């Protein structure tokens, strides 16, 4: 498909912006295994859940880890889960029905202090929304209840952001690279997150960070990745027009190949688990 800007035909790699329903299926097919599992593995290795009366899983995606958590808990524990949107919720409910799971998926706003434990996946939550997301998790936890959140912290995506800055600067987009600089600055440090957690009402706050490496054969493979094209780049480039986004994607893939040649392209992410108890 082509669009015309200033009399010039511009080739687009996709025919149209993906719908929420399409993104929900892509999240289920690709993002869970490629991205989410890195964070849930960190949670599984470092969080011991006791036999509480009930547990809430915030941002449970299409449900895979919520089902796994359910299997580890006693039959008397009620497990509830929320999803990012209605289309993701539909897939999660269909999965629950198919496997006979009693995880209760919902999109309602739960009452204050309703749960003994809260797990929250903020791995794809924009950095500037983390504070509100954590506040909501603490809000629904009972006093003394455990709150655990997994998310991305400062120092992540450095390999991409340096190239992205160069592309934006060279193409005169994003205020000459200022957009990329803001992406770096917006990422919360672990110490800042611990302060935010304490301010939200948690005590005995602890954190655990693991370095996760994502590897791609070349720039083209990087650009074709659903994780990158449909979930990471749209958030990073949200201030650009659709034509500008496609321009950046193309130039970014070219720059990756120019910089790395025959070598694979890697970027690193600092996956962090933050835990605490509601004071």
Image (tube, rainbow, N blue to C red):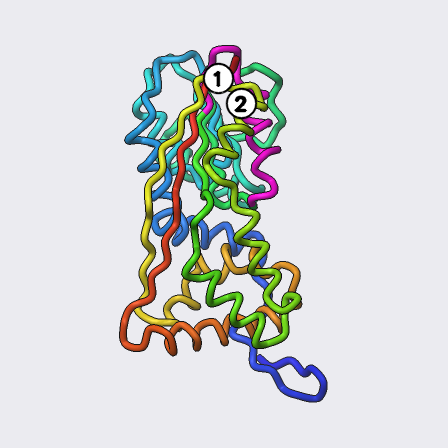
Residue 239 sits in quarter? bottom right
Residue 163 badge: none
> Can you say which quadrant of the picture contains the N terminus?
bottom right
Q: Is residue 160 visible?
A: yes
* Residue at image mark 2: 198
* Residue at image mark 1: 203
Local secondary structure at mark 2? helix
Q: Looking at the image, is 74 positioned above or below residue 69?
A: above
Q: Are marks 2 and 1 in contact (CB under 8 Å)?
A: yes
- Tell me what residue is drawn at x 43 percent, y 68 percent: 223
Query: How dense is the environment of label 2, judged by Cα within 10 Å: few (below 14), some, or many (20 and up)?
Result: some
* 3D distance between C-alphas at marks 2 and 1: 6 Å
Magenta region? 127-147
Q: Looking at the image, is 48 positioned above or below residue 217?
A: above
In the rendering, at what x and y percent does residue 105 appear? 50, 30
Local secondary structure at mark 1? strand
């Amino acid at each position: 498909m082509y669009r015309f800007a200033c009399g010039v035909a511009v080739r687009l790699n996709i025919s149209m912006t993906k719908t929420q329903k399409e993104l929900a299926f892509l999240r289920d097919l690709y993002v869970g295994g490629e991205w989410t599992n890195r964070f849930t593995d960190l949670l599984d290795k470092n969080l011991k859940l006791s036999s509480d009366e009930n547990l809430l899983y915030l941002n449970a995606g299409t449900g895979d880890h919520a089902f796994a958590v359910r299997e580890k808990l006693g039959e008397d524990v009620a497990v509830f889960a929320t999803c990012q949107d209605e289309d993701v919720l539909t897939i999660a409910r269909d999965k629950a029905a198919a496997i006979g799971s009693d995880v209760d998926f919902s999109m309602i706003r739960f009452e204050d202090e309703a749960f003994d434990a809260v797990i929250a996946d903020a791995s794809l939550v924009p950095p500037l929304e983390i504070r509100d997301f954590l506040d909501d998790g603490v809000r629904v936890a009972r006093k003394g209840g455990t709150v655990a959140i997994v998310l991305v912290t400062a120092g992540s995506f450095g390999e991409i952001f340096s190239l992205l800055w160069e592309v934006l600067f060279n193409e005169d987009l994003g205020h000459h690279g200022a957009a990329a600089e803001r992406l770096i600055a917006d990422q919360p440090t672990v110490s800042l997150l611990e302060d935010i957690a304490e301010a939200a009402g948690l005590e005995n706050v602890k954190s655990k960070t693991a370095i996760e490496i994502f590897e791609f054969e070349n720039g083209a493979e990087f650009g074709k990745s659903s994780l990158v094209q449909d979930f990471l780049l749209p958030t990073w480039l949200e201030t650009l027009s659709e034509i500008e986004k496609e321009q950046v994607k193309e130039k970014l893939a070219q720059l990756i190949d120019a910089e790395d040649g025959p070598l694979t392209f890697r970027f690193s992410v600092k996956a962090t688990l933050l835990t605490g108890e509601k004071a």
